[in-house]
Image (spheres, rainbow, N blue to C red):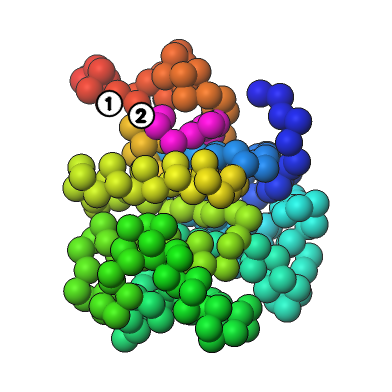
Amino acid sequence: MEHAKEGIIELRDVTLNYGGDDVVKNVDLDIFSGETKVILGPSGVGKSTILKAVLGLIRPVSGTLRIHGEDISKLSERDLVRIRVRMAMVFQQGALFDSMTVGENVSFRLRELGLMDHEKIDERVNETLSFVGLHGAKKLKPAQLSGGMKKRVAIARALAPNPEIFLFDEPTVGLDPVNLFNIEQLILKLKQTKKATMLIVTHDVESAMFLADSIVMLHEGKFIFEGSPEALKNSKDKRIQTFLDPGKVELI
C-alpha cells in the first residue's frame, strides 16, 4: 500500500529476545501518521514484545527501531522519556492503580511529568473522562468499575497527555459483546477525532478486521502477511486460513 503520509514507527530487520529466546526474528514494519496498524496472531508469538520494544522497554538484539526517524535502540533512559511522552500504552488488563480514584489514575502521567498545572489537569481529566463516556466516575475506585469501564478509564489515562501514538495490547480481550462493541467504537472515535496513529496487537480476528487500515500477521516470529483486512480474508496461505477459521482444519 502506498502512503504519502509521514512514517512514524519503523522497524528494520529487528530481532527481539524475550525469556532467553528470539521471539521476533528479522522483521520489517512501517506505521504511518494517522494509520491504524494491527498485529494479528495467536497468543505467545511475540506481539506484545513488539509493543514493549516500541516503548523502549526492551531493546532489539539486532536491527533498528525508529520513532519519528530517531533510532530509539541507541537512546539513554533519559532520552527515551522524551520519546515516550509522545506515546501512550493501553494495557491488556487496564493496569489501573487500585489505591487511586479514577480521576487520579487519569491524571497520573500529567502529574508525574509535570505537564500541566493543577487547574488545567482537573480540566483535562474531566475532558478525557467525558470523551470515554465516564464523566460521572471521577471519584470512584477501580474496584467499583466493571471490566469495560476499567478499559475506558485506561483509554482516558492514555489520552490525557494528548499523545501522537496509541499502543493497544489486546484491547478487547475478556469483554462481553456490549463492552467489546463500546471499546471498538471508542478506538474508532480516537482515530476519527484525534487523527491518532495506532498500533494494536490482538488475536481477535473480528476486531482486527473491523479496526485495521492494515494488518500484519505474526507467525513463529515472522510476519507472513501484510495488507488490508480484505486481502487477509482472501489469502490462500494455509497458515492464515487455519488461524482465521480453525473449524476448517481437517482432522488427521
Write down the quadrant of residue 202 in the picture.
top left
Residue 215: say if magenta: yes
Residue matched to label 1: 246
Q: Is residue 176 left or right of residue 20?
A: left
Q: Is residue 241 above or below residue 158?
A: above
Q: Amino acid at mark 1?
A: Pro
Residue 226: say if magenta: no
Q: Which residues are magenta?
A: 209-219
Q: Is residue 95 above or below residue 98?
A: above
- Quick check: marks 2 and 1 in contact, CB under 8 Å? yes
- The percent position of residue 86, horizontal first and vertical second, equals 65, 63
- The percent position of residue 120, horizontal first and vertical second, equals 55, 78
Image mark for residue 218 = none
Q: Is residue 51 left or right of residue 90?
A: right
- The percent position of residue 79, horizontal first and vertical second, equals 75, 73
Q: Residues within 10 Å of mark 2 (few under 14, many from 20)?
A: some
Residue 11 in sight: no
Q: Amino acid at mark 2?
A: Phe
- The percent position of residue 227, horizontal first and vertical second, equals 56, 25
